[in-house]
Amino acid sequence: LLAPGTGPVGPASITLYDAGTMDGGMGGIQNADALCQGALNPSKGSNAIAFLSTSDQDLIHRPEVPETLPVLGPNGLLIANNWADLFGGGESIETSMYDAGVLPFPSSEFYSGTNVSGQYSSLNACYDWNSPSLQDTGVVGIADLTTENWINHALPVECAYAYHLLC
């Protein structure tokens, strides 16, 4: 996710984008954040972080995220009115990741390690994004859903396989 800087008043919105595909061995959350920084070359004052939960940090509570801003796709379409609206039982998002231009195909899946409430999905985050093993698993979301399962749509997948990294 990228919160573009707009000068002294701060960011106007949060933009989700795709950093490409990779397996679950991203080198931990700090390296996943660095992959996000490098994928877009964000403008000065912007903060790009990985859209992932870890055992130490639930996605819904990432301190770097300005929680009251609207969440948009790269094409400017509204995904959610604010950060909290992305998560929660029974919650749906306004626009799918595919329609918002975040992911290239309706069937695109992305790692999240997150349950529908935005919290860490215990034991399903590829050992905090350090494992590329077939024996370890990670939770994925899918690009074409807008229902609560957009972020956690199926059984966990093996960490050896490449899925998209959202930022």
Image (spheres, rainbow, N blue to C red):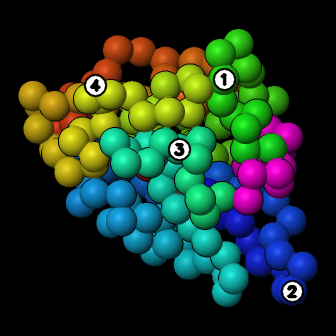
Residue 159 in magenta stretch = no
Q: Is residue 57 left or right of residue 102?
A: left
Q: Which amino acid is tagged 4?
A: Val
Depth check, mark 3 against mark 4: the one in front is: 3
Depth check, mark 2 against mark 4: the one in front is: 2
- CA separation, marks 3 and 2? 26 Å
Q: Which amino acid is tagged 3?
A: Leu
Q: Is residue 54 left or right of residue 15?
A: left
Q: Is residue 78 left or right of residue 67?
A: right
Q: Quick one: label 1 or label 3, which is nearer the N terminus?
A: 3
Label 3 crowd (10 A; few <14 / some 14-19 / many >=20): many
**At x 33% / y 66%, what residue is drawn?**
31
What range is drawn magenta here?
66-81
Q: Quick one: label 1 or label 2, which is nearer the N terminus?
A: 2
**At x 49% / y 42%, what residue is drawn?**
58
Give the quarter of the image for residue 92: top right
Residue 73 in magenta stretch = yes
- Element class at badge 4: strand
- CA separation, marks 2 and 4? 43 Å
Residue 35 location in percent, x, y?
40, 66
Residue 65 location in percent, x, y?
66, 58
Q: Which amino acid is tagged 2?
A: Pro
Residue linked to disc 3: 59
**At x 81% / y 60%, what residue is drawn?**
13
Q: Which amino acid is tagged 1?
A: Gly
Label 2 crowd (10 A; few <14 / some 14-19 / many >=20): few
Residue linked to disc 4: 157
Whether residue 30 is visible to the viewer of this picture, yes or no, is yes
Most distant residue in the right direction = 9
Dominant secondary structure (helix, strand or loop) of the stretch shown in magenta: loop
- Element class at badge 2: loop
